[in-house]
Image (spheres, helix red, strand yellow):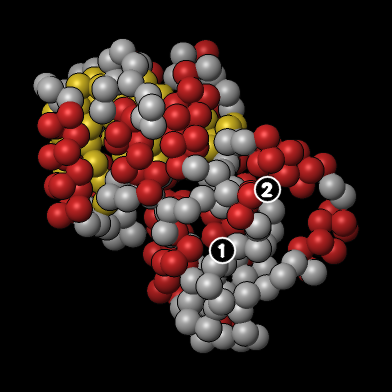
Amino acid sequence: MLWENKAMKYAHAVITGASSGFGAAFAHRLAGECAHLVLVARRGEVMDALAEELCAAHGGLKVTVRPCDLSDTAARESLIRDLTRLPKGKLLLVNNAGLGDYGEYVASAPERNHRMLQVNVVAVAELTRALLPRMLEQGGGIINIASLAADLFIPDFAVYAASKAFVASFSEAIRLEVRSAGVPVVAVCPGPVHTGFGDVARRHGCTNGYSPFKKWFYTPIPTVVNGAVDALESGKARYYPSLRIRMAGLLVRNLPLWVLRLVMGRRPRKVSSHDEA
């Protein structure tokens, strides 16, 4: 069975980046565990089709499609106003939306960097701040999608890796703040996954596939999503979705900085020098 179905646990589940990849997978996983799904992404028509599919498969499920560009401050503020008006009940927030940009920082587009930071950092912080008070009162939890990149500094992926380091650190701190209130927070740290993310992150001039990892290092989407939900329920602080990823994370966290610098400095690169954005 690809997607697990368990007893209903939440009144609402808010999923960002819900039009594809992890976001759509979280929607499938959580459809049987909550009364109301709120799907957030830019592509409303794609989410409409997903909502129709989910409602057909899960009788009684309510799905709200909320198109929103999380990189836009006004759109994000409007979304937050709507979310704070949701009816009472236990709420799960899945901060999944993320943008990447693969290429040398000196050649990056400032606007693209701005959008990436707004989505990967600011939106995560603002949505958490807006919804956490009701979780403390009514119950809930937070799943933040970080990355194995959170443990690394990665040439040609500088801003993305740094943004995911923020997500991981932020999640750890918030978890400690609200742990006594029974609100779990988990940072999910997958390695490479076939979600289409790389095609969007890759610039002109990059070779096909931004990741240097071999095929055996990839993790199936359902493994990441099902494991993330289970990790939240078991109170884990971080979730690495396979033994290979866990071992890689353990290794990079314990390597001396000079060794890590040497390794990352010799990492195979897939961009031309000073490639244009």
Q: Which of the pair 30/254 is nearer the observer?
A: 30
| Outermost residue toward the front in this view | 1
Res. 248 image quadrant: top right
Q: What crowding class fits label 2: few (fewer than 14 Cα within 10 Å), some (14-19), or many (20 or more)? A: many
Please state if 22 lies on the left or on the right of 270 as rendered: left
Counting from the top left corner in percent of width and height, residue 27 is at 29, 36
Counting from the top left corner in percent of width and height, residue 141 is at 41, 24
Q: Residue at x 53, y 83 (%)?
A: 205
> Which type of secondary structure does the marked residue at label 1 adopt?
helix
Residue annotated with mark 2 = 151
- Callout 1 amino acid: Val
Residue annotated with mark 1 = 159
Q: What crowding class fits label 1: few (fewer than 14 Cα within 10 Å), some (14-19), or many (20 or more)? A: many
Q: In which quarter of the image is the N terminus?
A: top left
Q: Residue at x 13, y 40 (%)?
A: 52
Q: Report, in whole angstroms, how far the alpha carbon at label 2 lies from the one at label 1.
A: 13 Å
Q: Is residue 155 shown to the viewer in this render? A: yes
